[in-house]
Each structure stands twice: as structure tokens, then as C-alpha cells.
């Protein structure tokens, strides 16, 4: 028997950063976003002995261990090892992990990887199975405590729950996932007018960028995050009401606030791509994730998306087709 699982990556509309401690505990965080049909897949094949074999297509690595105790953190696939150690399976296995997106994509792929692997191991548990909230929280704890990757909880909860949601964060494990009640025609219109654009490799992880931002003066940082949350509050109401031109405007506004606070999140190439999009029919554009590279999210005026796509690709970017994902983490069994 083979256990397979997949967890989607996310695109953030607004609120990123307000889910990071200590802001969420002191003031309450709010993020708005969606998951898309780009996944991190895990395949788990139990063995009859205690040996462990890890295959990561994205890292181009294969590692073999006699048992769990032999496994150490050494900078090679440490996230995978951390999930295995936390789940502590009482059997040997072969584990295969691959992603539809590259590392440092800005789409929360590491959280999706953790959720996907936890889902596979959890499926085999006969007792003490984890529910969705527990899987998302464990994925967050693993990145924070084992991998030391500074960040918030948005990515993990999005990967597990899927859909178009707002996420409330109030410190520690208090998280509320709110499905946004958006009209079907608005969802279709969002799908039509949004572009996901690969702008180039991001050298830093999101955690490294967040470390840079953590050095900002306290009052300045809090004021900036208050503004970011205000945009997220407005965003969720605009989506419910189907005012999608306003949605595009808020995408633009959220990016401008991000750059104003930390100019290192962008560079000349990213600025050029965003200006190109705006000059050819886009209402708003912003980088996903902490910044510095990865994927742009672009919202276009009706019937300009082909023009924007063409001009961006002339500039060296790559437009990535996508659809929304409404299933979140899924696990299934196959016989081979």
C-alpha cells in the first residue's frame, strides 16, 4: 500500500505579516488569501524493516538511514527530517516529496510540504489522529522550532484548509479560518483577471527577510502592520461584495506599503515588471511572500490580461496558468 497526499500553495491578497508573533497576540492579525492548484506531493511507502529512505525531487537528493535515531539535521532536507521526527512513525518507510513550484517561490511551499507529509503519516495512525487545525499547527511548530524559519501561521492553515478565506490570529494557537462567501461569478471573474507571474529566483528564504524586518523600530513596525491589517479588513468586504476593481486597487496599495516599510523587498527588475503590468492594463500588482523575488500576483482590467501577459513575458517573466483550489490537504491510498 502507498499513501499519497497533496497540499496546495497559497496566494496572499492582503494582511501578510500580521500573523507573525508578537503582533498577532498583542493586536490580532488578519490575512486574506486563496490556495491554487499547485501542490506539494508526498508518497509514503511503509517497509517491513526500520530503514528510512528520503527522496526529494526539488532538492535533487536521496538519503538513507538505518533508523530514526541515525537521522540528524545537517542542512540537507531538514524540513523533511523534522516532520519525520515529530510524527515518530513506528516503522521504516520510503518517502518521496516533490513540489509543483520551486523553493523560495513566495507561495508558502515549505508549509505545504510540511502539511503534505504530516497528512501521509497521520493517515496511517490508528489512534490520536490529528484534525485539520492540529495538522496546520504542527506544521507551523515544526518550521518555527525545528527549522528556525521565522514566520506566521497563514501558510500552514491555508495549505490544510484550502479555498478563499480570511484568517484571524490572536496569539499562540488561536486561529480562526473564515470561508469568504463570494458569489460564484466573482470567483470566475477573479480567476479570469488574475495573473500569477514568475519574476525570478528569490535568493533569501522568507524567514531571512522577516529577520531583516524584525530589526525595524518597534513603533514604526506596529504602525506599518496596523495599516496592513486595515487593508486586509477592507479586502474581505470588497470580495464579498464583488467590487473587483477595488480589489485590484488594494493589491497595489498593499504592495506600496510593503515597499515603503522595507525597500529591500523589491529590486530594479521587480519594479520594472510591476510598472510594465500597470502600464499595459493591470490595476494592481504585488510580490507574493516576504519579497526579493519569486512570484508576482497581478490583477488586470477586464480583457487586458492577454496584453499584460504578453508584455511581461517580453520582459523575461513567465506567466503561470492556475485555478483556485477548494480542497486543501488531501490524502489517499493506492495499491501497486
Image: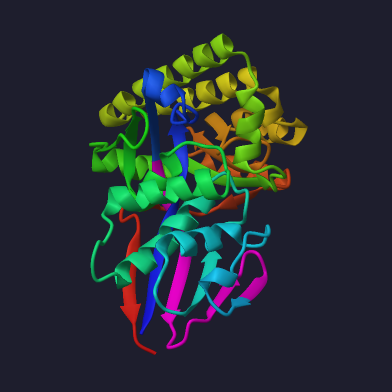
In the image, is residue 251 above or below residue 313? above
Q: Residue at x 42, y 21 (%)?
A: 229
Left or right, residue 157 beside residue 131: right
**Closer-to-camera residue (200/206):** 206
**Closer-to-camera residue (108/244):** 108
In the image, is residue 149 above or below residue 329? above
Residue 103 at what x, y percent from top left?
62, 54
Quick one: quadrant of the C terminus? bottom left
Q: Residue at x 67, y 69 (%)?
A: 60
Left or right, residue 263 beside residue 69: right
Q: Is residue 193 visible?
A: no
The picture quadrant where one finds residue 271 is top right
Residue 19 at what x, y percent from top left?
43, 31
The magenta stretch spans residue 105: no
Its colouring scheme is rainbow
Residue interval drawn in magenta? 34-63
**Closer-to-camera residue (115/315):** 115
**Closer-to-camera residue (22/254):** 22
Q: Is residue 215 visible?
A: yes
In the image, is residue 11 above or below residue 42? above
Quick one: quadrant of the N terminus? bottom left
In the image, is residue 205 above or below residue 283? below
Left or right, residue 134 beside residue 231: left
The picture quadrant where one finds residue 210 is top right
Q: Residue at x 46, y 54 (%)?
A: 112
Give the total of numbered labels: 0
Which residue is situated farthest in the right direction here?
A: 268
Residue 185 at what x, y percent from top left?
28, 41
Q: Residue at x 34, y 34 (%)?
A: 167
Residue 150 at what x, y percent from top left?
56, 38
Amino acid at each position: 500500500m502507498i499513501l499519497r497526499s497533496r497540499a496546495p500553495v497559497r496566494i496572499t491578497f492582503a494582511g501578510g505579516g500580521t500573523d507573525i508573533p508578537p503582533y498577532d497576540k498583542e493586536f490580532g492579525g488578519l490575512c486574506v488569501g486563496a490556495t491554487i492548484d499547485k501542490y506539494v506531493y508526498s508518497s509514503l511507502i511503509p517497509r517491513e524493516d526500520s530503514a528510512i529512505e528520503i527522496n526529494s525531487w526539488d532538492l535533487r537528493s536521496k538519503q538513507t538511514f538505518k533508523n530514526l535515531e541515525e537521522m540528524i539535521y545537517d542542512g540537507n532536507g531538514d524540513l523533511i527530517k523534522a516532520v519525520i521526527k515529530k510524527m515518530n512513525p513506528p516503522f521504516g518507510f520510503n518517502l518521496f516529496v516533490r513540489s509543483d513550484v520551486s523553493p523560495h517561490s513566495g507561495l508558502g511551499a515549505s508549509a505545504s510540504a510540511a502539511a503534505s507529509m504530516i497528512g501521509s503519516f497521520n493517515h496511517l495512525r490508528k489512534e490520536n489522529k490529528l484534525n485539520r487545525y492540529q495538522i496546520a499547527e504542527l506544521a507551523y511548530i515544526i518550521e518555527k522550532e525545528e527549522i528556525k524559519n521565522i514566520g506566521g501561521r497563514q501558510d500552514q492553515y491555508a495549505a490544510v484548509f484550502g479555498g478563499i478565506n480570511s484568517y484571524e490570529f490572536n496569539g499562540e494557537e488561536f486561529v480562526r479560518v473564515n470561508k469568504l462567501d463570494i458569489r460564484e461569478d466573482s470567483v470566475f471573474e477573479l480567476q479570469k483577471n488574475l495573473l500569477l507571474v514568475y519574476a525570478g529566483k528569490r535568493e533569501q528564504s522568507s524567514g531571512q527577510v522577516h529577520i531583516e524586518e524584525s530589526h525595524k523600530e518597534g513603533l514604526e513596525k506596529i504602525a506599518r502592520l496596523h495599516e496592513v491589517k486595515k487593508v486586509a479588513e477592507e479586502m474581505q468586504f470588497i470580495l464579498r461584495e464583488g467590487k473587483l476593481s477595488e480589489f485590484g486597487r488594494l493589491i497595489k496599495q498593499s504592495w506600496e506599503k510593503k515597499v515603503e516599510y522595507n525597500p529591500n523587498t523589491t529590486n530594479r527588475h521587480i519594479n520594472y515588471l510591476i510598472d510594465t503590468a500597470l502600464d499595459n492594463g493591470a490595476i494592481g500588482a504585488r510580490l507574493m511572500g516576504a519579497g526579493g523575488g519569486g512570484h508576482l500576483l497581478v490583477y488586470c482590467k477586464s480583457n487586458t490580461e492577454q496584453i499584460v501577459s504578453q508584455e511581461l513575458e517580453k520582459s523575461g517573466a513567465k506567466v503561470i496558468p492556475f485555478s483556485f483550489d477548494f480542497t486543501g490537504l488531501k490524502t489517499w491510498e493506492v495499491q501497486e
